[in-house]
Image (tube, grey):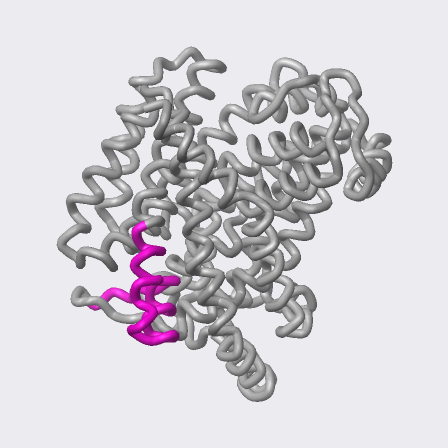
Amino acid sequence: MEAITSAVGWLNGIVWGVPMLVLILGVGLFLTLGLKLLTILKIPLGFRLLWEGRIPGGEGEISPFNALMTSLAATIGTGNIAGVATAIFLGGPGAVFWMWMTALVGMATKFAEAVLAVRYRETDERGKHVGGPMYYIKNGLGKKWNWLAVCFALFAGIAGFGIGNMVQANSIANALNANFAVPEWITGVVLVGLVGAVLLGGIERIATVAGKLVPLMAIGYIAAGTFVLLINAPQIPAAFALIFKHAFTPTAATGGFAGAAVWAAIRFGVARGVFSNEAGLGSAPIAHAAAQTKGPVSQGLVAMLGTFIDTLIVCSITALAIITTGAWTSGETGAALTSKAFDIALPGLGGYIIAVALAVFAFTTILGWSYYCERSLQYLFGVKIITPFRVLWSLAALVGATLKLGFVWLLADTLNALMAIPNLIALALLSPIVFKITKEFFDTKGKSEKNPF
């Protein structure tokens, strides 16, 4: 087992190393420039379409709004609390800057993913719309590229059980046990029941739950984080100064912080940013492919907001709370660091806020990833896999809640990165299609109709 763990660890170092980070940033920058900064300039339009998208229109199973909420259910998770803290612990305050840069170019990546997902989606034998990287690889690049689609579906199907289920269940169990003394097995049993009840209703029920729970949890966390920042308002300018300074200069050791080179700030800022918002991994377009939208570009404009909300808003709240309170020099890391920051500002209450937020965030991630994983396995084995998958997925939450998951986390993190490779290749090769239909949209429909949905 040690040899296997060592081998996976070696592979993890490669797939999350320089080439992968360059590929993610490179494709994102290429798409951003190819779209003429549209994804940044059209953020207000995206929010307008999101609001109007509460009312479905066009073919699909769920509203554009709920498609984004399903995507956010999977992305707003432990990465926003533990991932941001880990990036700062390993890369210093400068890592936050590179997390922001990843999000800015990642918006174009997420836009392109959703555009292609809707453009090349199919209807399965049950009459449901299915799509995502495996479908836009097969239908956009041709059958000779189907091996690449199979690779993506395989990586996603396996990685989902780890990073989208058991790791999340473990985080929930640990948080509730540490703060409320709830035994891990009880948390596991409750999760099996809750997850199973939602999954029985398919994407429609997942989307309905996400549509109600995600806005509530995001607003609640942002409100608590904003309160922490108001308490530490005088330190906010200094926090931004630290972020921009150490994005380009090394961070010296101070307190419990060991110090970090500029490369560490870039590496961990980009890696944790991608882990949080999933831009480029190819997961979110699977949800957006089910949206009741009249066109690919409309859904792309909604989809890109997932990266904006996840990283530029939620992750920034966490990062600024950690830096303004001075907790980043405490020597803590992961969720414990974020919890310490909130507890410094809100003694006796902050830790409980983070515990509850972590539990809710992780639960919605389990729901969102269940859909990604189901669709990936459906691509490989057909609709007959759906019912057995939902049973197995629900039971996996109990395993995750009660066991140590060091190897599972390592393997899932590695496969998560491997998902990005087929997807990014497809995005680069299909970029002319994205540029073409986007230009056509804004030249005609986008200008002539008040409601492009």
Left or right: 214 in relation to 203 = right
Left or right: 17 in relation to 214 = right
Residue 437: where, in percent of width, then height?
51, 81
Q: Main secondary structure of the magenta part?
A: helix
Residue 59: where, in percent of width, then height?
33, 73
Is the residue 447 above or below the residue 322 in the image? Answer: below
Which range of residues does the magenta coloring cover? 127-154
Is the residue 256 above or below the residue 61 in the image? Answer: above
Is the residue 346 above or below the residue 216 in the image? Answer: above
The residue depicted at 42 percent of the width and 29 percent of the height is 6
Whether residue 142 appears in magenta in the rendering, the answer is yes
The residue depicted at 57 percent of the width and 51 percent of the height is 19
Residue 240: where, in percent of width, then height?
81, 40
Most foreground residue, 292 or 105: 105
Give the position of the N terminus as an image quadrant: top left
* Residue 22 position by quadrant: bottom right
Whether residue 117 appears in magenta in the rendering, the answer is no
Q: Is residue 376 visible?
A: yes
The residue depicted at 42 percent of the width and 41 percent of the height is 365
* Residue 392 position by quadrant: top left
